[in-house]
Image (cartoon, helix red, strand yellow):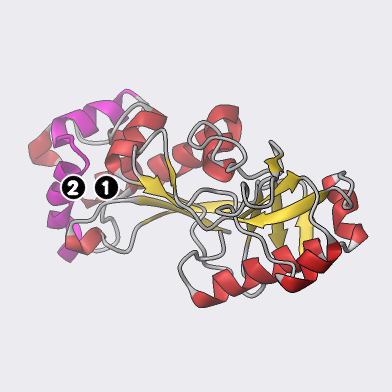
Amino acid sequence: MANRGTKEGTDEEVAFVKKLNQKQSDLWKILNLDFKTHFAVHVKTQQKGKISKYKVFPKADIFIAKGKIDNHILEKIDYYVDDTQIEKYDLTPITKTGISVKLSDSKSYTIQKFTPTTFKKIFDNYELGAGASLYSKNEKDFNKNFKVIEGWNTDLNNVLSFFLNKGLEISKNQKDFNLNDAKLIKKYAIKKISNIIQTDENISNFVFQGIGNFEEPYTAHYLFEKGELKNSCKIPFSVTTGSGRSRGDFTIVLKPK
């Protein structure tokens, strides 16, 4: 989504809904739908994620619904419809039509954020997340790693065992854990997380489209970015730590590369 919650993001989504509902046929050709009987609907409501169990904004910022809205009504409402008005206009949501809208000048939006709990549900361990979150650049920050590991619901012994089993040449004992170990672990963990997302279709679908987390039509199947509508939401990404790590808020964040 286009940095949901910001005025700029919402404005861009609203503008795109109106653009579609003004029936610009080149965009409807990409959607492969008849624009005379279909309408763009803005997602204004939060949806309960199956993984987190919390209500959050879903991957789709817009979806398409089928029905009939007379032209004079469309003009009266300035071509804007949101998902609280589905029943009002007797519209039927169409599955697999969700569109993720990105700000035209945005390069730093979040693709996906994993808390330790969510990470465990998706990747089946805490240790990869802990490893990717380690401080590994400066000796002065090294001792923060013990809080990082604790924040990821694991301990140093589990972390060392996990990465030793992956073939890393790191210290076998907790007392020998050092900055070089942290560097090797972090590099491996980030690469491994990236590889899993790229090669595991279920995880990739979850990350980029919200499939497996949200019900239809709130998953994303199209991407509107830099003025172009694409029929794929999967883009190059980098694995980073969240900005709250120093405050004890541990997350893994995926950003566009």
Q: In this view, does 227 lie to the left or right of 214?
A: right
Q: Is residue 162 covered in magenta?
A: yes
The one of 58 and 138 positioned closer to us in this rendering: 58
Q: In this view, does 30 lie to the left or right of 40?
A: right
On the image, the x and y values in percent for residue 97 come to: 71, 43
The residue sitting at the left extreme is: 175
Q: In the rendered view, would you say 213 is above or below 75?
A: above
The image's mark for residue 182 is: 1
Total label count? 2
The one of 205 and 72 positioned closer to us in this rendering: 72
On the image, the x and y values in percent for residue 24 come to: 88, 64
Q: Could you tell me the amino acid type at mark 2? A: Asn
> Which quadrant would residue 52 be assigned to in this image?
top left
- Crowding at label 2, few (<14), some or many (≥20) Cα neighbours within 10 Å? some
Q: In the rendered view, would you say 241 is above or below 91?
A: below
The residue under the point 39% across, 34% down is 51
User: Circles 1 and 2: CB distance less than 8 Å?
Assistant: yes
For the magenta stretch, what is the residue range? 140-165
Q: Can residue 231 be seen in this view?
A: yes
Image quarter (top left, top right, bottom left or bottom right) of the C terminus: bottom right
Image quarter (top left, top right, bottom left or bottom right) of the N terminus: bottom right
Label 2, secondary structure: give it.
Answer: loop
The residue indicated by pointer 2 is 178
Q: Could you tell me the amino acid type at mark 1? A: Ala
**Please, what is the dominant secondary structure of the magenta stretch?**
helix
Q: Is residue 157 covered in magenta?
A: yes
The image's mark for residue 47 is: none
Q: CA–CA distance between discs 1 and 2?
A: 7 Å
Q: Is residue 169 visible?
A: no
Q: In the rendered view, would you say 74 is above or below 130?
A: below
